[in-house]
């Protein structure tokens, strides 16, 4: 089944595209306030309209509900994987890092793993991955419109041993990241090189 672009219902928002682009920040701290399933559905509806060469619909999302058995299972696996991965031999330090990983998983109001499907060749696989990154950015911008922030990570939580099996993902898919969502009062400072330094105007 394919959705027809002519039938899309656009959620109302007073946040402009430029507001969303310039106000988006990757945050690490979330208020405990829940993110409703309805809100997440709107973010997913934005995600799937990422540009997509060949219309391969390559992105797969695993939304892990807060408080669910699956969230607890991933948290336990994250604890172990962090504990095993910490280079510092001090067991107290290892435990602190492992606890932090576990709590990050348990406490986030919303948590979504994102994978990208492989194509028949490297070119299509790369195009699919580009689409999946755009899908996450669509979610990040829609999240701003919803008064939310995201944390997109390709860190240790995406490298938990056996993760694909736990989620029910195909081992061959490419991990695009784990994305946390929630309300956040954090306003982290961030920087970019000015566009004048990275744009070449050609005549
Ligand atoms: C593909 C990707 C992977 C990322 N992985 C991590 C990560 O593993 N750990 C982390 O702290 N931040 C991660 N981030 C967030 C970036 O660190 C963040 O975007 C950067 O600090 C700039 O902040 P800003 O996006 O709010 O401007 C990731 C961002 C992207 C796009």
Image (cartoon, rainbow, N blue to C red):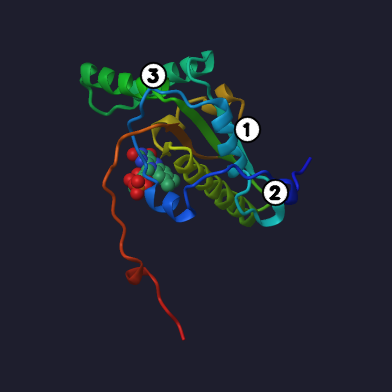
Residue 172 visible in image? no
Q: Position of residue 9 (x, y in %)?
A: 67, 43
Q: Are marks 2 and 3 in contact (CB under 8 Å)?
A: no
Label ID, residue 56: 2
Q: CA distance from mark 2 to mark 3?
A: 36 Å
Q: CA distance from mark 2 to mark 1?
A: 17 Å
Q: Position of residue 109 (x, y in %)?
A: 44, 25
Residue 194 visible in image? yes
Pick the front one: 2 or 177: 2
Query: Residue extending furthest right?
Result: 1
Q: Are marks 2 and 1 in contact (CB under 8 Å)?
A: no
Q: CA distance from mark 3 to mark 1?
A: 22 Å
Mark 2 or mark 1, whichever is nearer to me: 2
Pick the front one: 85 or 7: 7
Q: Is residue 63 left or right of residue 79?
A: right
Q: Is residue 39 left or right of residue 109?
A: right
Give the mark nearest the N terminus, 2 or 1: 2
Disc 3 under 8 Å from ligand 1? The reply is: no
Tag 3 residue? 80
Tag 1 residue? 170
Picture quadrant where residue 42 is located: top right
Mark 3, residues whose alpha carbon is within 10 Å: few (<14), some, or many (≥20)?
some
Mark 1, residues whose alpha carbon is within 10 Å: few (<14), some, or many (≥20)?
few
């Amino acid at each position: 089944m394919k959705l027809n672009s002519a039938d899309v219902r656009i959620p109302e928002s007073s946040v402009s595209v430029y507001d969303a682009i310039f106000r988006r920040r990757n945050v690490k701290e979330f208020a405990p306030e829940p993110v409703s399933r309805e809100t997440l559905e709107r973010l997913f509806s934005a995600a799937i309209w990422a540009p997509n060469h060949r219309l391969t619909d390559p992105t797969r999302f695993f939304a892990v509900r807060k408080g669910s058995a699956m969230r607890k299972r991933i948290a336990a696996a994250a604890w172990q994987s962090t504990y095993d991965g910490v280079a510092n031999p001090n067991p107290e330090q290892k435990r602190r890092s492992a606890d932090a990983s576990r709590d990050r998983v348990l406490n986030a109001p919303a948590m979504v793993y994102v994978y990208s499907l492989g194509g028949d060749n490297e070119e299509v696989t790369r195009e699919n991955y580009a689409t999946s990154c755009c899908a996450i950015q669509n979610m990040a911008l829609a999240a701003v419109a919803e008064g939310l922030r995201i944390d997109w990570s390709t860190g240790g939580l995406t490298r938990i041993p056996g993760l694909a099996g736990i989620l029910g993902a195909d081992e061959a898919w490419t991990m695009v990241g784990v994305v946390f969502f929630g309300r956040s009062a954090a306003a982290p400072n961030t920087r970019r090189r000015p566009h004048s330094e990275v744009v070449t105007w050609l005549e």
